[in-house]
Image: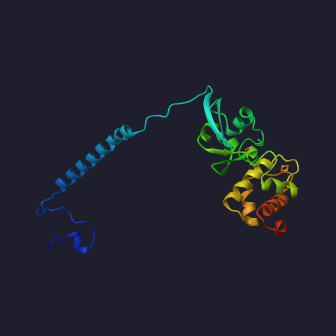
Amino acid sequence: MPRKNSDSLGQGTREPSASSGITRRSFLKGTGIGAASLAAVRLQLPAVVAEVQEPPVPAVGPDPVPVTLQVNGQTYTVRVEPRITLADALREHLDLTGTKVICDRGMCGGCTVLLDGEPVLACMLLAIAAQGKAIRTVEGLAQSDTQLDPLQDAFITYDALQCGYCTPGMLMSCRALLDRNPKPSLADIKAAVSGNICRCGTYPHVFAAVLAASGQDPRLAQQG
Ligand code: FES
Ligand code: FES
C-alpha cells in the first residue's frame, strides 16, 4: 500500500524533500546558521548603542553652585547647594517668605507658586530645576504698593482666610485658574484648589471670593 503524505491528511508539516532541493539536513543546518547569525547581531547591539549614547551630564554639588532665578520679574543669582528646594531658596535665600512651607512633602499645596503660569509645589522642586522659568510668588500678585490684585481684594472682602497659613498657596492656585479661565464655574474653582488644604475650613469663602473676582455672583458658592 502506498505511504500517504501527512499533508494529504491535513495533519503535520510536509517534510523537506530531496525533490524540492531542500533536505532535512540542509534545512536544519540553514536554520542553525540563521539563529547563530541573529545571536551575533544581538551580541553586537550593546556596542552599537554605547556608541550613540550622550556624554554623561556633569555632576554638580554637593557644594553650593550659582543658581539664577527669575522671580516676579526680577533676576536673582544665589549660591545654594543643588539639593535646595525652590521653596527654601525663595524663603531662606531671597527673603520671599510669603511662600509657606507647611508639610514639606507635596501634600498640602501651601507652597504653591507659578512656574511659567502653571501652579507647582515649590517644596517638591529643586531650585536649580526652576532656572530659566518665570517664577511668580504671592509677593508678585499686588499690582503696586498700594493696589492689590483683585483676587486678593476679594479674599479680604469675602473673609477667605482665618489663620492665613494656606492663603498664599490658595491665592496662587486661584490666580492660575483665573489667568487661564476668566469665568470659572464653581466646579472649576473646586478643582483648582483641590490640592490646597485649608485646615480652618474656609473653602466656601474662597469659592465666593473667586466667583466675585471673576465678576460672578458669589452666592453661587452656596450651591455646592
Ligand atoms: S509645603 Fe509644599 S505641598 Fe505642603
Ligand atoms: S486659613 Fe488656616 S489653614 Fe487655611
Q: Residue at x 41, y 39 (%)?
A: 53
x, y percentage for residue 40? 29, 43
Q: How is the image coloured?
A: rainbow
**Count of numbered circles in the view:** 0
Q: Residue at x 33, y 44 (%)?
A: 42
Q: Ligand 1: give its quadrant.
A: top right
Residue 128 visible? The answer is yes
Say which quarter of the image contains residue 205. bottom right
**Camera-side residue: 17 or 84?**
84
x, y percentage for residue 45? 34, 42
Quadrant assignment for the N terminus: bottom left
x, y percentage for residue 28? 22, 53
Residue 194 visible? The answer is no
x, y percentage for residue 199? 84, 51
In the image, is 65 to the left or to the right of 7?
right
As drawn, which residue projects farthest toward the top?
Answer: 63
**Camera-side residue: 75 or 161?**
75
Q: Residue at x 28, y 70 (%)?
A: 11
Quadrant assignment for the C terminus: bottom right
Say which quarter of the image contains residue 63. top right
Q: In the figure, 36 relative to 209: above or below?
A: above
Q: Residue at x 66, y 59 (%)?
A: 180
